Image: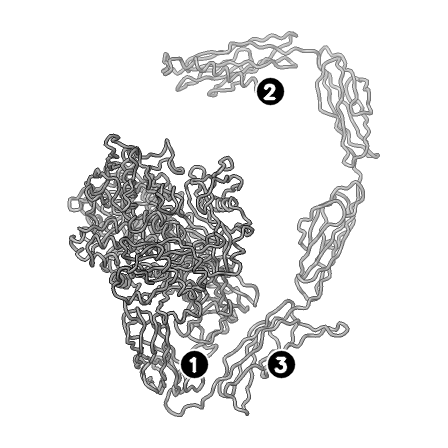
Amino acid sequence: MKRLWMGTVSAVLAVLMWSPQAHARQAAVDAFLLTPADRSLPQSAASASQRGLRINSVEGRLGVPTFVFSERSLSAGPQAKASRPLTQASANTAAREHLRSVADLYRLNASEVNSAELRQVHMPKGGEGAVVATYGRRVNGIEVFRNEVKVVMDASQQLVAISGYLQPRQQDDEKNAQASAFRVSAPQAISRAFQDLTGAQLDARALVPAGAKGDYSHYTVDSRQLSTHGFGEAPRSKKVLFPMPDGLVPAYYVEVNAGPESNPDASYTAYVIDARDGSLLLKHNLTVSEQFSYRVWADPASKLPYDGPQGTEATPHPTGTPDGYQAPLNIPANLVTLQNFPFSRNDPWLPANATVTTGNNVDAYADLGGGDGFQPGFDLRAPLSDVAGRGFDYTFDLTKSPAANQTQRLAAVVNLFYITNFLHDWFYDAGFDEASGNAQLSNFGRGGLENDSLRVEAQDSGGRNNANMATPADGARPRMQQYVFDGVAELSVSEPAPLARGYLSYTASFGPTVFNLEGDFALPPTGPDEATTLAYRIGCADINGADPYGGTTPFTGKIALIERGTCSFAYKVLNAQRAGAIGVFITNSAAGALGPMGASGVAAVDRAITIPSLLVTKPDGDAWRTALATAPVKGRLRRNADLDRDGTLDNEIVAHEWGHYISNRLVGNGSGLTNNQGGSMGEGWGDFHAMLLSVRAEDVNRTGNNQWQGTYGMAGYTQSGGRNQGYYFGIRRVPYSTNMAKNGLTLRHMADGTAIPTTHPTNGGGNNAEVHNSGEVWASMLWECYASLLNAHPFQEAQDRMKRYLVAAYKATPVSPTFLEGRDALLSVAAASDPADYQRFVSAFAKRGAGFGARVADRNSADHIGVVESYQTGDALEVVSITLDDSSVGCDKDGVLDAGETGLLKVTVRNAGAGNLSAVTATAAFNGSSPGVVGAFSSGSSLSFGNIARGATATASVAVALTAAPAQASGALALLGVDVTFPHNLLNGTTLRAFRSQVNYDEKPNTSDTDYVEAQNTPWVASTFNYRPMWDNGYATTGYWHTSNEATSLDKRLTSPLFNVAANQNFTLTFFHRFSFESAYLSGAWVHFDGGAIELSVDEGPWENWYLYLTPPIPANPNIALIDEGNPYLGGWPGFAQLSAGYPSFARYTANFGQGLAGHQVRVRFRHASDGGVGAYGWDIANISLTGITNTTPFYSLVAETFTGTGTAPTCNVAPVAEAGLSQTVTEVVVGAGGVVTPRVITLNGTGSVDPDASAQSTLTYAWTQIGGPPVTLNGANTATPTFSTLVPANTIFTFQLVVSDGTDSSQPKVVQVLVANVNNPPVAVARVKDGGPTTVDERSGSVTLDASGSTDADGEELSFSWTQTAGPAVALDDETSATPTFAVPEVTADTAFTFSLIATDGIADSEAEITITVRQLDRAPVADAGGDRQVGSGSTVTLLGGAVDEDGEDITFAWTQTEGPTVELTGADTGSPRFTAPEVTGASIVLRFSLVATANGQASAASIVTITVTRDNHAPVVTTMSSYTVHEGSGVKMRATAEDADGNDITWQWTQVAGPSVQLEKSDTAEAFFVAPEVSETTVLLFRVRAKDDLSSSEPAEVAVTVRNLADEGGCSAAGGSATSALVPALAMLALALRRRRRS
């Protein structure tokens, strides 16, 4: 699945970026944006300026404008009020008239405009301001998704601008809107989306239709069909037609709110699923992140919210400098009584009978359960605290944790309910009403979809340190989540007195999060040498974090001061912890911005840290070190839950998230901000909504803010604490201020690789294109606009205007907008209302670099690189290009102006300003040329461009003669300098453009060891796409090769000439480069979707990744990583990824391939691959050089002409042009009549070579050279058509170079390749036994090795083999592809043939052979078994249990004979089981022995013997004994046993110990055993066992338990009141029983 990136979400994840550098853009898919933006505008666009239209932005995927201004509206004076009544109907009529007048620009016709669906008319309050009519398109009643055109008009309904577009009609649109086109069902589409979101399967049958609302079909979910995941909100879908450049795709728009079973509300995502095959077209994260009385932080009189618990004093910042200011949290929350904030409708927030914080606009609760929506029993809505007085009066204690008690949480809920309702009312009359898609339970019949009131979740249990806003399309409930923020650690020094105060510090993402520690500070010890001392100071011995302290503990009981540097923070802290530290301060290595300390990423290291650590500034650390030289320094580190800050109380965070909701609803109805620039603007809009809330009329009276130039931090309450700069920076890198010395961000700072200003303090860095960082730029521009209104109008009027402009601009903004389209939306609505405000906004944007003529990257760019700033507000020109050639009077016509030649200086400009320009004339003047270089303007120095319409381009030229260009003492080429002065400002604010060009040189091949990318001719070959080179040669402009990282799947290659690798030298490749490729930070790791790699081809063989050839050790390079497996060209291989270090500077890279390629010919190529998704800047490569090659100068260089303008000029001559013919593929031989084979004569063809200025008598001479492939003899190498013949063992490439000469000059070399194909002779397979072994073998005789090594190939090609058994019982070959496989000779029941087939192949043709191995069967004697020896009673009947086995399976006969003892009669002596009667025995036992011999097929077995012992009748003895004794330690113990034997036989005894401490048993073979009780520390039990035996059998054992008491315990009792012995004796009894059972079993 492919991702596009957005960032703010809201439709996308509008998560506030608290640590911008640690987060990345959010994943998404947009199939439309994946297509190339390469369509030009319609031809009629060329005359747009003559029609009074200004085309500002285009959508190149369709070839239509996205923002068109009416020049009349921008140049007219103040607009009069409408002369006719302004109604929705009149606005609709006027807007359609305007659309019809420009329909050709949009590839539409009048009927298509007439049939467009009117979706909304934004009407200005009081009939003054912008009117915005929005149109969409339907086909067969089905909405064309996200396809809108907005007509912006003034109050008199005159056209101001047109934003967006309608999809041009295609041939199959009607067909694709038929029911039959929707082959996938809506439940199947929801199932597909659910699977993509969760990874879990969902049977579409689990989705039960639950009715329809508007275009939407709603579904309930059978939860029995779900196991590991679940739904939050029930899913809904609607049929749509998804626009693609080549037509409309039938699809379903689906919203899925789902997640793991434990948190089904985890993700809220919109999808568009292709109804033809279920594929993803769009994926878009929807998460971006009566009168009653309310106790809240708001003004009780005006009802306006404060910034938070700090009140309003921190904005603007009191000092305007980052001085650690902390606002005192002593502003009480006020009890504010109101029905609603006053607006035109005055709809109440709560009904008169309400008892909790659930109203028509907002449902507010503390989300403590973590599941979907409000969960009774877990979550908390705030109930009335005073039912009679209808009050929600809960006091939040700022000295306690936000989660300290229920009152804290209820107070937070009330505050959140108040602020979000306030914002609903505050923006209603600005145009965010029901018809516009606001969120309400009931819309009171005023339009839009209802039942979508805003869910706001306070103290959400799903996270910390953040907030987010999920905004589905109108009709589904948006959700705001507010989290608790970690409190800032407090660091203070108590002594010595001069240092006693609080200090700025930053916490670590490892170690304890709660601590309260006091202690002495300690310096590291001094080591025996300088290196060891340094290791002690920085806390690690090497970059890998090795412990420098070697087991010593110099910090025991103290807080260690360690310096930053060399290894990661976590290793330093762990090493200090091991050295005895109770805490650690890491002191910064230099003055400057700090931030939280990151973990090492090694779990064993990070988890081992148990002590707190803080990062402090270098000046503070240095002061402590100085003080420690003379006295102790003591301090305290504290951080606990009471320091946490509740984001629910930070009203600026709430307003920011609410800003996501309004911008996402009004731009594309939840799916408009899907691109990275759109997401960035969403973040900026969110910040600006917070600014609107925080800026107050009285702020202008603050010191340093008389022109609204103060500094405003964003989200100061949650970001402040300790001695940090939370109130100055808030969550952003800079504060918001119109003072460029406080906030110097301009348009270029939205692009990665552009350093943010260093002229003022900043708060961190990170990639500029990250949405929150780019959003700072957008919000800074909006703040400039607002400040211009505040400086021009009374405060309330300025605020009202800004809110109206903002809402109208949302409605005028196209989907997937760029910054400049967002700018133009705001300009258009201002122009429609007040031209003076329009001009104020023009100046505001221009101040930040977004003036007329500014440019930004494509709307689908991930890195935003490509910004061109402009600070112009009026007439302005952009210089498109300046070139110098030799086209007027040129001697060699090579495009280079040489001495004695005259060429044209061509200048192309674009009118980037505010209006049309008349009679534009520029003046050229020589300046900046090299010493002695003289030029002249042959026909004057004036460049006349004529009239240039706004946005149009024009070209003018003047003739330039180069009269002198002497060689330079430095060896540099001559330089001709020209300054062009224009009558209007250029984009950079100047009127002069300097042009410097090298002159008087030729391009010479094979003269340089480095490619400086300065020659038009080049030996490099770039791959092409649609006949366009995919790498740009920047010889005339940039001096580097460039390829862009496009949003489509492309493979771009730049291939070198052949390099002949020398012996005994390292073969190296060195170049300078910079790059930016699409990457994203996902699930805690970077994923590199696109990248660049180096590849090598050895002897014209396959291309392979350069890492396969590098010589170890390979230097670490942070910009080299594995490219994502999803990349079809480089996936899984190392490549250059992400943003190059130090961008935009070029970095040197060297690849050392060692000496392993010596003697080979090698090509290298630079390969950039994109997987399709979002785009980025791409790759620049310069100064390419190699070492270790014999063709040491493979590149072009610029060589000065010998004629410099003095003396006799050489005769003019145009160099000839070589043409080496087309590449060929031929066979090595020709098969003639009768099958005669002869080598082919291969002819090269240079007859296409030409001499442009040849005379009738002149002829060309030819010089062919072989430069690649095995050497051949080239016959006629000095002719146009040389020949050669060759035989090749495999397909082989031969490379030849042609240079032609006209007698004066030689051509540039041209190269041609010939692939000579091998004509194959099939191999001959030979199968035999290795080493001439026999083909007949005995069974079980070992193994047989087959042998194919005798196979031959007439071409000498390497053979491979494949063996297959074709006959006989299956056997296993150890390697079926080996020349010599082996198998074990099996056992057979008869002589058996085993046949094997051999196939030998040379890779082209096969040959087969066969071999048979015969295995002979050999007979074996059986094996007899007379059975086991036994003991039987006298007179008993005994059956012998004999048997035999014959491995050959033959019949067996038996023969028993008695060999010992009194003779008995065997019955069945020829069977396996004969019988006999045992003789009578009265005394000693007797022994009988029998022999068994088995015979099979005449083969007799060895005899097997069995012994039968016959005994008299006997009864085993019976033992009795005392089962337990209790004794003291050290006492003697005598254990007695008695036994009875029914037969009167003599008895012997055996005592053994089976448990307890081991003792020495005396007389263990008698009836009375004795031992001495051991010393014990507590009561202990010993267990013994006794047996009695007669001469034949043994008794059952009897157990005896001996309890040994410790003398000190005598008389003691257990805690339960019983003696220890009383518990142990039953336990021993159970043990004895268990042992007895185990023995018997």
Which residue in the protein does label 2 denote? 1641
Amino acid, disc 2: Ser
Please indicate whether residue 469 sits to the left or right of residue 1135 in the image: left
Choose the circle earlier in sequence order: 2 or 3: 3
Image height check: is 97 above or below 899? above
Which residue in the protein does label 3 denote? 1275
Q: Quadrant of residue 1347?
A: bottom right
CA gap, disc 2 and disc 3? 99 Å
Image height check: is 1295 above or below 236? below
CA gap, disc 1 and disc 2? 106 Å
| Scheme of colours in the image | one colour
- Seen at 55% across and 92% down, the residue is 1257
Amino acid, disc 1: Gly
Image height check: is 597 above or below 1606? below
Which residue in the protein does label 1 denote? 895
- Seen at 53% across and 80% down, the residue is 1218
x, y (%) of residue 1404? 67, 62
Which of discs 2 and 3 lies nearer the camera? The answer is 3
x, y (%) of residue 1342? 72, 45
- Seen at 73% across and 25% down, the residue is 1427
CA gap, disc 1 and disc 3? 36 Å
Please indicate whether residue 989 sits to the left or right of residue 1445 in the image: left
Q: Which of the pair 1510/777 is nearer the observer?
A: 777
Amino acid, disc 3: Asn
